[in-house]
Amino acid sequence: MAAFVDNDDDNFWQLATLYVDSFTPRCPPVFRDRVNPLTNLDEVELRARFRVTKQCFANLLATL
């Protein structure tokens, strides 16, 4: 019975090794600098991008 348990342990570790080796490392996170559209865009650019006025954008932002 002990040989059967040892064999199961060996199988477990072989499968565990295959499982761990199959993972690829994640890419490091990329943090981008976020810009505030209310300060960086003028009225025309903001309206072209978001289809709302600055006042409406500010109201929506405050609501969220």
Image (cartoon, grey):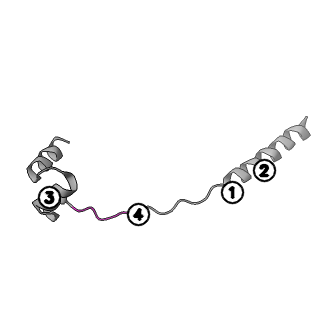
* Residue sitting nearer the eye, 6 or 15: 15
Q: Quadrant of residue 45?
A: bottom left
From the viewer's perspective, tell me whether residue 31 is left or right of residue 54.
right
Identify the amino acid type marked 2. Answer: Gln
Residue tagged 1: 21
- Residue 62, image x and y in percent? 14, 45
Task: In the rendered structure, find residue 38 and report the number of the disc placed on it.
Answer: 3
Identify the amino acid type marked 3. Answer: Leu
Identify the amino acid type marked 1. Answer: Asp
Residue depicted at 81% across the width and 45% down the height: 11
The mark nearer the N terminus, 2 or 3, is 2
Residue tagged 2: 14
The mark nearer the N terminus, 2 or 4, is 2
The mark nearer the N terminus, 1 or 3, is 1
Helix, strand or loop status at disc 2: helix
- Residue 44, image x and y in percent? 12, 60
